[in-house]
Image (tube, helix red, strand yellow):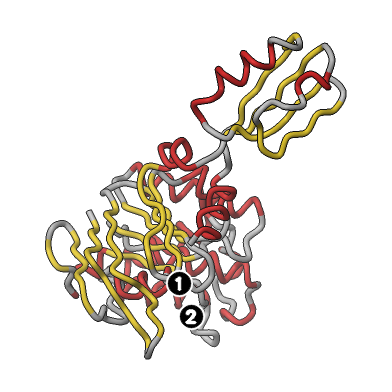
Amino acid sequence: MLEIRDVTKAFNKTLAVDSLNFDVPQGSIFGLLGPNGAGKTTMIRMIMNIIQPDSGHIFYNGELIQKSRYKRIGYLPEERGLYQKMKLKETIVYLARLKGLSSSDASKRTDHFLERFELTAYSQRKIEELSKGNQQKVQFIIAIIHNPMLVILDEPFSGLDPVNQLLLKDIINELKQGGTTVIFSTHQMEQVERMCNEICLISHGKRILYGDLAQIKRDFGTQTVSLEFTGDSKAIENVELDDMMITEGRLTGVLRNANSLNDFLRKVMEYVTVTGFRIEEPTLEQIFIKQVKEV
């Protein structure tokens, strides 16, 4: 488990991370989310020991995170940082060796991932000759080639087409099934909804939402209702819904209180006949926007 305890970091007079606390359970896919400038990358860089917190502590498996742990950690930064003049395969093998792999293991694993990502034909090309999407795949391979127990992925889908996004998701899920912990930072909320068990949403360096994603959607979201009916539409114009719209035989809107569903249905059925009804959970993106605006 990774534990963040009262971590604070300031740059000059700008407070980038403000007394941040959260836990990342072992073997989970954890979403670290926030708008631009929220402090996500600063927090990731502190976990990776690239910069030091001004105060607070970072624990891994109950101990202060130490240099010896970093060979079991993989990191995909948002910014590309490959050696542009080196050839593709030698780049991956070199960085895998720095992670502690033997020369033969590094070469075998590199060949495996090059084949899986359909990069074998480019193995002797220089990095600068690869497309942005292929360079992103190379950085992902480098982050996981040493079988890390913790992987931090900052915008991993950047520059990838839908086919390669799906491949990355498959591999991330395989890592989870193998017991690897994945911290996943992205602006693509739909990817978070599909993949993450728990999330931490930060804004201006502070924690805004944290915990089980399904529970957060229940606790902090609104409920959108869609109802089909027969009868006089004017008779239901005063029901208590936000953003209400009534068209021919159809009513949509947002419940003001999640517990008011039964009251809403009883009131509607006093005036019209309900022929169909559906309730939709809010998307994480809707919750994200609402919570960030309220800070």
The image's mark for residue 77 is 1
Quadrant of the rendered image containing residue 104: bottom left
Residue type at mark 2 is Gly
Up the image or down, 252 lies above or below 196; here it is: above
Quadrant of the rendered image containing residue 136: bottom right
The image's mark for residue 143 is none
Residue 276 visible in the current orientation? yes
Percent position of residue 16, x then y = 39, 77
Up the image or down, 229 lies above or below 225; here it is: above
Q: Residue at x 35, y 65 (%)?
A: 74
Percent position of residue 1, x then y = 22, 53
Residue type at mark 1 is Pro
Q: Residue at x 60, y 82 (%)?
A: 128
| SS at badge 1 | loop
The image's mark for residue 81 is 2
Label 2 Cα crowd, 10 Å radius (few <14 / some 14-19 / many 20+): few
Residue projecting furthest to the right: 248
Q: Residue at x 76, y 18 (%)?
A: 228
Up the image or down, 193 lies above or below 274; here it is: below
Q: Residue at x 47, y 42 (%)?
A: 220
Horizontal side of 191 relative to 91 (left or right) equals: right
Up the image or down, 287 lies above or below 95; here it is: above
Percent position of residue 18, x then y = 33, 71
User: Do tag 1 and tag 2 residues touch (Cβ < 8 Å)?
Assistant: yes
> Which of 41 and 137 lies nearest the eye of the viewer?
41
> Which of 73 and 234 lies nearest the eye of the viewer?
234
